[in-house]
Image: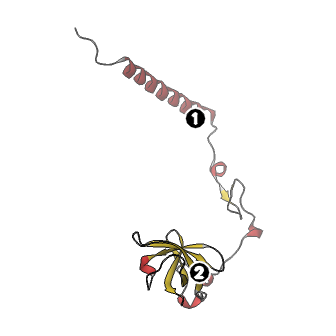
Amino acid sequence: MGRSQDTFAKREREKHRIKKQEEKKEKMKERKASGKSKSLEDMMAYLDENGNLTNTPPDPKKKKTFRQEDMQVSVPKLEDRPVELPRNGTVAFFNTHKGFGFINDAETRERIFVHVNDLSVSIQENDKVTFFIERGPKGPQAANVTLVK
């Protein structure tokens, strides 16, 4: 007769799996026998006014009410947005082959990303430009970039 196809590691894994199943069944029997199952109130979690989870219900005196008319679920209308003036800056870096660069804002000294699609004319490093700031996918981005003469 031939040897068994099961290796030592396979037999050990199978023993370990069976042992875990038996331990799990024993724990389940112990929980049922002791009657220490949690009630619904013990399992409830509440959210306080600061957004933290607690086991006590929130104080009804601190409850805030909101009117449905005051809630905005969509993007604000164009007339509600503040009017933004064009900013001045200097081109710190621009790679014509890759089509992007950075502008140093004259007021805030912030570096603003600029893409070739947002340019009205070609720019080079150290050019003085005016631009508007828009929200890009990775942060502020310059738009409507024009040269200052």
Q: Which mark is residue 32?
A: 1
Q: Earlier in the sequence, mark 2 or mark 1?
A: 1
Residue in the image at 64% along x and 81% along y: 67
The label number, if any, that marks residue 89 in the structure image: 2
Establish if 96 lies above or below 25.
Answer: below
Q: CA distance from mark 2 to mark 1?
A: 72 Å
Residues under numbered marks 2 and 1 in contact, where contact means CB atoms less than 8 Å apart: no
Residue 64 is situated, as x and y percent measured from the top left of the image, at: 71, 73
The type of residue carrying mark 1 is Lys
For the point 57% across and 79% down, the residue is 90
Circle 1 Cα neighbour tier, 10 Å, few/some/many (<14 / 14–19 / ≥20): few
The quarter of the picture where the N terminus appears is top left
Check disc 2 and report its element: helix, strand or loop: strand
Name, please, the residue furthest toward the right.
61
Q: Nearer the viewer, residue 63 or 33?
A: 63
- Local packing at callout 2 (Cα closer than 10 Å; few below 14, some 14-19, many 20+) is many
Left/right placement of residue 144 relative to residue 104 reads left
Q: Which is nearer the eye, 148 or 8?
A: 148
Residue at 66 percent of width and 80 percent of height = 107
Q: In which quadrant of the rendered image does the C terminus lie? A: bottom right
**Image-based side of 14 in relation to 110, left or right:** left
Residue at image location 66% in from the left, 51% down from the top: 41
Q: State the image coordinates of residue 72 (x, y, percent, origin top left).
A: 57, 80
Spot occupied by residue 121 in the image (x, y as percentages of width and height)? 44, 85
In the image, residue 36 above or below residue 7: below
Answer with the quarter of the image where residue 33 lies.
top right
Give the structural element (helix, strand or loop) at label 1.
helix
The quadrant holding residue 106 is bottom right
User: Would you say 122 lies left or right of 32 here?
Assistant: left
Residue 120 image point, x, y percent: 44, 86
